Image (cartoon, rainbow, N blue to C red):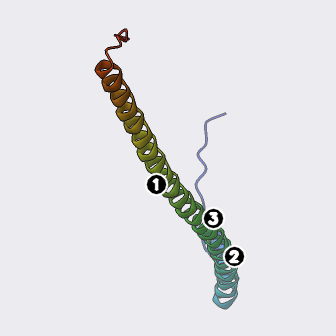
Amino acid sequence: MAPTIAVPSTQTTPHHRRETSAVPESEVLRRRNEELEKELKKSFEREEKMREELQKTWKRLRVAEEAEERLCSQLGEFEAEAVDQARAYRTRVMNLMDQLSLAQKLLQSASVVVPSSQ
């Protein structure tokens, strides 16, 4: 048997075109419109979810900023307290040094020998 080649006839091609054109253009447009409306609805839903997420994030950011402000304020208060304590400690040390110096002078004037701690 000899090989054969299938060639589409001109009669099947117009028939195929009739099937695709059998659906009225208005029906095609109506379906496409429905698809687009569904996509638009989904888009609006996604947008709303994103808006809600943005609002939640914004609230968390405000809370974090408020916490940061409170911590900075507390840190400033602690720093001021530490400076006050350091000044008071320095004043106390200076007073003790003055007392010690005066005591050493008094002992020297009384001719009492005090061993040096150094």
- Looking at the picture, which amino acid does disc 3 mark? Arg
Q: How many marks do you count on the picture?
A: 3
Q: Locate the C terminus by quadrant.
A: top left
Labels 2 and 1: the sequence-earlier one: 2
Residue 43 rendering spot, x and y as whole percentages: 63, 75
Name the quadrant containing residue 38: bottom right
Which is closer to the viewer, label 1 or label 3? 1
Q: Do the CB atoms of the residues marked 2 and 3 lie less than 8 Å apart? A: no
Q: Residue at x 45, y 46 (%)?
A: 88
Residue bearing the label numbered 2: 45
Distance (Cα) linking label 2 and label 1: 53 Å
- Distance CA(mark 2)–CA(mark 3): 23 Å
Residue 48 horizontal/vertical position (percent): 66, 77
The residue at 60%/59% (across/down) is 8
Q: Is residue 23 above or below residue 12?
A: below
To which residue does mark 3 refer? 60
Front residue of 17 and 62: 62
Image quadrant where residue 12 sits: bottom right
Residue 14's label in the rendered image is none
Q: Which of the 4 image quadrants contains residue 37?
A: bottom right
> Mark 1 = which residue?
80
